[in-house]
Amino acid sequence: MADAKSVNLPLASKKRSSGPEEFDGGDDFYKNPKKPSFLPPSSSSWGDHDPAAALASARHEFGEHGGVNMSIEASATFTVMEPETMRRMFAGELGPDRDFFVYSRHFNPTVLNLGRQMAALEGTEAAYCTASGMSAISSVLLQLCSSGGHIVASRTLYGGTHALLTHFLSRACGITTTFVDIRDHDSVRDAIVQGRTKVLYFESMSNPTLTVANTPVLAGIAHEKGVTVVVDNTFAPMVLSPAKLGADVVVHSISKFISGGADIIAGAVCGPASLVNSMMDLHQGALMLLGPTMNAKVAFELSERIPHLGLRMKEHCRRALTFAQRLKGTGLKVVYPGLEDHPDHDLLASLSNKEYGFGGIMCVDMGTEEKANKFMHILQNQTQFGFMAVSLGYYETLMSCSGSSTSSEMNEEEQQLAGISPGLVRMSIGYVGTVEQRWGQLEKALSKLQEHGKN
Ligand SMILES: Cc1ncc(COP(=O)(O)O)c(C=O)c1O
């Protein structure tokens, strides 16, 4: 236990007696004091990333009294012993890498710990956790693009992101987006305007169509033209590691699988330490100045859930595959990358981290919105298979008709181009109950639907 506590104490005591004499120089920070560096690169290696192994090797914080869980640093502001320390912190000379904290919109130790876990999960140098997935996405795009900038993005994206790119960024900052079919690599290449395009943006596995992006090829195209690749990995944590595959930045809605409880809204930006540092810059940092800060108590809650994310993902994925195969056997039109007839099946098998499967979401195309609604109504209210609700990654199954809900920001033509049919039911497969109990509920719902059809 004494060893365990010593992980934290030297850093804490360093702060209490801060002063120039404490630092022996010799590190890059002192060689280049004008360049603030708040976060040191972590030791994670991008090349051979295994999310489970990386999470197990990430620094474990212990509690103030030797608790196996870290203490929550619930302070908004932090004291210093000497006024000079404050000046140096604001000058960017002293930062959280040396346990100097100023104010929790900037950095908070508990939130920073979750950031370390997210960086380990995604195999990036650093990560910063935010109040929502949307704030992570909007902040990183605003950091990477200036007014008049250009983004090339997949046309199959979560509706909120699509609206951000289509309407908000163009109106508010003159940042425009060209949408492309992310499977058509020539069109991605053609859409990039060298010198003007700053970001290539796509989802590793798209919401809701479950298109899998060929990240290595797309990153190659973007990097040839000096474009930064930002990938939303919300649908496939543990399953895919986009940074290992060539992405520069990985964003998450932590509200989904990573949280797993459907009780928290949160997000993260995972990427190079230089990007996270730039986003925290006092004068130019999108996170620092827009302030989508995560609360320390929320960060603590989430930190406790990440250790079982891998186990949860395996079960979400195992059940999604089972139900997708069985539903397909009934003649329904099922979209799931784990099925061999899915156009991205082989691609996903070649890119994914082994043992996690093909994702916890599957879709059933019921043809019309009316039939989709009837099916979901029976599944929730008559056979208790799941809940009609947006979001995903919950332990219960959640179902929504994407065209009229989470993709409704897209107009009819945009939905058609994205491959979202009006009867598409997205199902985030839960893991409570037994598989056979749940399958019985699905089968019963299908026969009730057939009966309805006859009447
Ligand atoms: C793929 C994807 N990215 C981002 C978001 C936005 O995340 P949040 O709701 O946490 O802001 C969502 C939300 O549904 C999503 O599905």
Image (cartoon, helix red, strand yellow):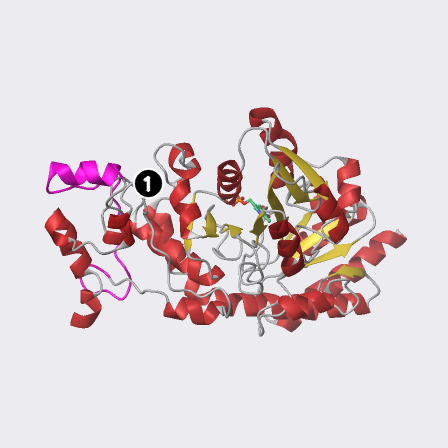
Position of residue 427 in the picture relative to residue 172 (left or right): right
Whole-percent x, y for residue 70 in the image: 27, 59
Residue that lies at the very extreme toward the right in this rendered image: 454
- For image coordinates 66% across by 50% down, the residue present is 207
Residue that lies at the very extreme toward the front in this rendered image: 31
Residues rendered magenta in the picture: 63-91
Residue that lies at the very extreme toward the top in this rendered image: 171
- For image coordinates 82% across by 46% down, the residue present is 368
- For image coordinates 61% across by 38% down, the residue present is 195
Residue identifier under label 1? 106
Q: Nearer the viewer, residue 285 or 299?
A: 285
Whole-percent x, y for residue 429 in the image: 62, 61
Whole-percent x, y for residue 194 in the image: 65, 41
The answer to if 76 sits in the magenta stretch is: yes
Answer yes or no: disc 1 within 8 Å of ligand 1.
no
Badge 1 amino acid: His
- How many neighbours does mark 1 have within 10 angstroms: few (below 14), some (14-19), or many (20 or more)? many
Q: Is 106 situated above or below 120?
A: above
Position of residue 368 in the picture relative to residue 244 (left or right): right
Q: Nearer the viewer, residue 377 or 417?
A: 417
Q: Main secondary structure of the magenta part?
A: loop
Whole-percent x, y for residue 242 in the image: 56, 59
- Regarding mark 1 in the picture, which secondary structure is present there? loop
Q: How many marks?
A: 1
Q: Quadrant of the N terminus?
A: bottom left
The answer to if 384 sits in the magenta stretch is: no
- Residue 129 visible in the current orientation: no
Position of residue 354 in the picture relative to residue 135 (left or right): right
